[in-house]
Amino acid sequence: MPEGRIITFYSFKGGVGRTMALANVAYLAAQNRKRVLVMDWDLEAPGLAYYFRGFVDPNKAEMLRQTPGVLNVLWDWSQNALAAETPDQLDALTSRYESGDAFSECVRPIMDSDFLPSDSLLDYIGAGSPIINTPEPVAYEQALSDFSWHTFFNTASGGLAIEAWRRWAKLNYDLVLVDSRTGLADAAGVCTMQLPDEVALCFILNRQNIEGIANVSAAIRANGAGRIALRAMPMRIARQDTAEEIDAKARAIAELSRVGGFLTADIQRDMQELSVLAAENVPFYETLAPFAAYSTSLDLLSFNYRKLTQALLGLSIPEQILDLNLHERVRRRLQGRHATLDYLARLKVGEPERASKELDVLLRTAMADESAGQPLGDDYSEALIEACFELGVESETSIALQLQALAYLRNLFVSQPDRWREDLIRGLESHLDHLRVSKFSSGEEERALVDEIDSLLAYSNSIGSILKRARYKQTEAQRLMHRPEGSAGSELLMAQAKELIDSLYVVEHALTIQEVGELRVADANLSLQAGWVKEMIGSLDQAVDIYLSALNKIDSLDHADAWPELRRCRVDLLFRLAMSSSVSMDLRADFALSAAESGSDTLTFAARFLTLESVVQQAGDEVAWAAYIKLGLGNSELTNQGVVNFYAVNTKRALAFLELVQRILDKHLVDVLLDKMVFKNLTEVITAILKFQARAHRVSPDGATRRTMQNQGMQLLEQFYSLPLGVENSEILHQAIASLGEGPQELTE
C-alpha cells in the first residue's frame, strides 16, 4: 500500500479562510473513498472541529471534546522522556510511539458513518483535552502556557516523537491534513517544516499576507532541502478583476518568485487552479460549503472547493448530490440552544464589514435592554463584547464598533463594578492596542485610555496591578519622547512609574519569587528607557550610571536566569554599555563578551553580533576577540532558521558575515574554527547564503554583488578543506557542499 500524503494548510495571518478550506478538502476526499485524517495544530486558537459540529451526534461531540489531542501527546513525550532513568524505560516510551499507540489514542471519527462511503474514513485529532497532565492535571490553557518547545526538542529529543507521528500518519491514512498555527510560532515550524510532504500557503491579496507567505516559503525551502512541495493558495479573490486586484496578483507573483523561490509558471498555475473566489452570504456559523448551500450546482463556494480539491489532490471530484435527510439533520444540530453563543464567539471569522454591521445592531439592542432594566446574561454580554474586539480588521468601522462596545462595558461596570472591572480593563487595553497599530489614533485619545486604565487598576493594591500601572506609564512616556513638546510629560510619567516600582521594593521581602522577578524586569525596562533618554540629550555618563546600576540589581538576584525577560533586559543593558562612547574600549569589549555569554534571544543577538564584534575588534585584544567569536558563533541556537535567514536574505549582512569569516581565516584562529559547533554554524550560514543567492539569481540573473558573494562563499568553503578538520568537521563540510547541488555554479558560468 503506498504511503499517504501529509499536507499542511498554513496562513501567515488569520481570517483568510484556511481552516474552512481544509475542512472542505477533507470532506470531499473522504467522499471519494480516501482514508483521511485531519489534525488541529492551531494550539492557541483551535477551531477545526467547529466545521464538523453538525455531523456528529451531540453525545459523541461531547466525548470528542474530552479526547486527548496534540498537546496531550507533546506533554506525554516531554515528561516521560525526561523522567526515564534506564534504557528500558526509554525503549518502552519509543516503542509506544513507534507502534503508533500514543497517536491512536487521540483519534476519533469526526462524522457519523452515514455521511461517508463505507470504505472511507474521516478521522480527527484535536488540539487537546480540557484537562492535561503536565504531570499535574491542569486546564488546557495553563498546559499550553507552561509547555516549553525548547525543552521538548533540545532536552527531551522531541524530534523523535514528531518523526514517529509522521510515519504513523502516512502508514495509516491516504491523506493527512494539518491545520497549522498562523505566524512564526514554534508549532507552525513543526507543521510546515517537519510533518508535511506539502504545504498549502493560504493568503489573501494584501501586502502583509503576501510578504509573510513569501518569507515563510523561503524559510521552508531553506530548511526542507527540496523535500517539501509548496503550493500557493490565494483566498477570497474577487470574481470581477479590478485594477487593484490585478496589481495585487502581480505583486504576489513577483514576491513569491523573488523571495519565496517559486517559479513564475507554478504560481500562475496555482492562481488559476487553487484560488478560492470571494462569495456573498457566507454563513457566520462554521459548516461545510455543500451543507450551507441551497444547491451545490449553483453554489460558488462548493464549486471553488471542488476545483481546489481536484487540483491539489489530483482527484476527479463529481458534483455532490446531497441526501436531503442528512442536510436537514445538520441544519437542526446547528440550531441548538448554544448556537447563539457560538455564533457570537466565532463571528470574527466572517467577512469583516458585514460582521461589523451585524454586531452594531446586536450591541445597540443589548444597550437598549440594559437601559430598560432587562440586562442580558453575562455569558452573552461577554461573547458579544469579545466579538467586537476580535474582528481581525483595522478600519474606521471596527474602531467605532469598539468604542460602542466600551460604552456598553462602562454601563455594565457602573451597575456591577466588581463583576465587570477586569472586563472593562481588558476592553480598554484591547482598544488601546488596536489604536496604536491603526492610522486612526490620536495621542490625546491614547492618553485618555491610559488614564482610565490607571484609575481602574489603582483600585487594587495587588502586585500585578501596580506593575501593570508602571508598565503603562513607561509605554506612554516612551510615546511622548518622540514628540518635541512631550519631554516634560515623559519625565513626569517615568517618575510616576519609578515611584510605583520603588513602592514594591519596600515590601520585596513579602513578594513571591515570581513577583520579585517581575519587579526586577519592570525596573530594568525603566532603567533602559531612562538611560536612552539621557543618551538622547547627550548626558552619556549619566546614562552609563543608570545602566550599571540596573545591571548590578539584576546580577544581585539569585536565579536571575529563571526569567527569560530579565535575561533579555540584561543583554540589552550590556549592549547599551558596549556601544557607549563614554566607556573605555577595554570595558566595552568586556560588556560585548558578557552579552555574547548571556544572549538568549538568538535572533536579537544575531542582529547585534557583527556590531558587537567590531567593538571587540577595536579594543585590540586578539584573545578577547577570539573568545567573542567562539562565544557568538558557538551558540547552539545560531542555526535557528530565523537566524540563518537573517544573514542569508540581506545582502549587506551576508557580505559582512562572509568578510568576518575571511578575517578569522586570515588570523589563523584554527582552534576557534575547528570547534565543532562553530564550524557547523559557519558552514550552515554560508551554505544558506549561497542557496539564497542562487535562487535570487534564477529570478534576476543580473547582479555583480551577488556573483561576488557566491564566489567569496565558495572560496571560504574551499579554504576550509586546507584545515585539519578531523572526521566530524569533514563530514559537516561534505554535507554542506553536497546540499548546494548545481545552484552556486549558475552564477559563475
Image (cartoon, rainbow, N blue to C red):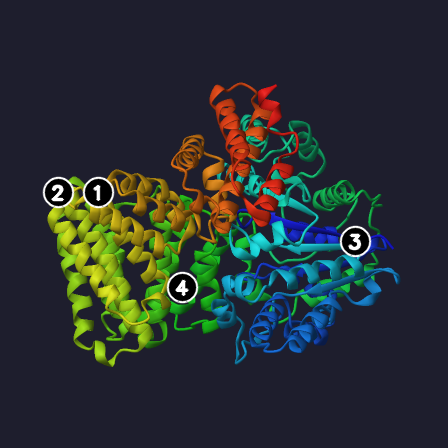
* Cβ atoms at labels 4 and 3 below 8 Å apart: no
Amino acid type, mark 3: Gly
> 34 or 163, which is in the foreground?
163
| Residue picked out by circle 4 | 367
Q: Position of residue 416 (x, y in %)?
A: 33, 75
CA gap, disc 4 and disc 3: 54 Å
The residues bearing labels 2 and 1 have C-alpha atoms spaced at a distance of: 13 Å
- Residue that badge 2 annotates: 537
Cα distance, mark 3 to mark 2? 64 Å
**Disc 1 residue crowd, few under 14, some 14–19, many 20+, Cα 10 Å:** few
Question: Which of pointers 3 and 1 lies earlier in the amino acid sequence?
Answer: 3
Dot 2: element: loop
Indicate the secondary structure of the residue bearing disc 4: helix
Q: CA distance from mark 2 to mark 4?
A: 50 Å
Of label 2 and label 4, which has the lower sequence position?
4
Pointer 1 residue:
482
Q: Position of residue 449 (x, y in %)?
A: 27, 57
Q: Quadrant of residue 743?
A: top right
Extreme front residue here?
724
Residue 164 rendering spot, x and y as whole percentages: 70, 62
* Residue drawn at (23%, 56%) of the image: 474
Q: How many marks?
A: 4
For the point 87% across and 55% down, which residue is it? 1
Q: Quadrant of the C terminus?
A: top right
Which residue type carries mark 4?
Met
Identify the mark nearer the N-term, 1 or 4: 4
Evaluate if marks 1 and 4 touch, with contact meaning CB atoms under 8 Å apart: no
Which secondary structure lies at badge 3? loop
Which numbered marker is on residue 4? 3
Question: Can you tell which quarter of the image residue 339 is in?
Answer: bottom right
